[in-house]
Amino acid sequence: MKCTIFAIFVLVIGCCSLPVSAQQQDAQELTNAVADISAREIALTKNKDAAGAASLFTSDALVVMLAPKLAVKPGREAIQRHIQDLIDAGLTNLTIETQQVERRGNDGAWAAGTYTVTVKDKTIEGNWFRTFKREDDVWKIAMEGFARTGTIDAPAASASGK
């Protein structure tokens, strides 16, 4: 009888531990995928490959620049043009640090962090937020929003003083 109770106890503990272990493995796989996408984006922009960097986004992705001026880039072609514009403007360095990653359902996730980008010796720092989804079993960026850190200068006073 004691052996039966012990076997049931071990079986129950084992069954309860499996989902936690699987969730931890799943979270690590997602964190690794987000880090890999960032590393590939950095390498591709360094190699001036806008098309390659844009391929990390879903075909219907959306990029939203929140500050200093709102700009929306819908679709992979617009995103590729945006990346190419940065490369053409003299992009020399991009860093992306992920601070938070969380799964949303089976094929969705979000992540947030910080970035720095250097264009013509001017370094810009900011924050980003991305949603990810699986496209053909590969994680891709579905939406990205980002903004520069720091204050935004107030508009100059009008000539009439009003």
Image: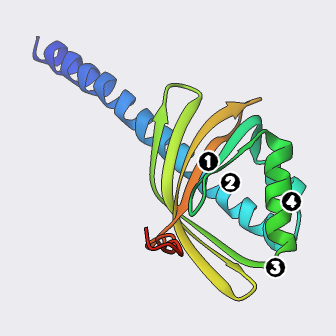
Nearer to us of marks 2 and 1 is: 1
Question: Disc 1 marks which residue?
Answer: 144
Asked if residue 153 lies left or right of residue 86, the reply is left
Instruction: Pick whichever of labels 3 and 4 is earlier in the sequence.
Output: 4
Dot 2 and dot 1 residues touching (CB under 8 Å):
no
Label at residue 50: 4
Residue at 86% across, 54% down: 81
Looking at the rendered structure, the kind of residue marked 4 is Ala
Instruction: Say which element carries label 2.
Output: helix
Question: Disc 2 marks which residue?
Answer: 37
Question: Disc 3 marks which residue?
Answer: 90
106, 160: nearer the viewer: 160
* Residue 43 x %, y %: 77, 68
Instruction: Say which element carries label 3.
Output: loop
Q: Residues within 10 Å of mark 1 (few under 14, many from 20)?
A: many
160, 104: nearer the viewer: 160
Dot 1 and dot 4 residues touching (CB under 8 Å):
no
Looking at the rendered structure, the kind of residue marked 3 is Gly
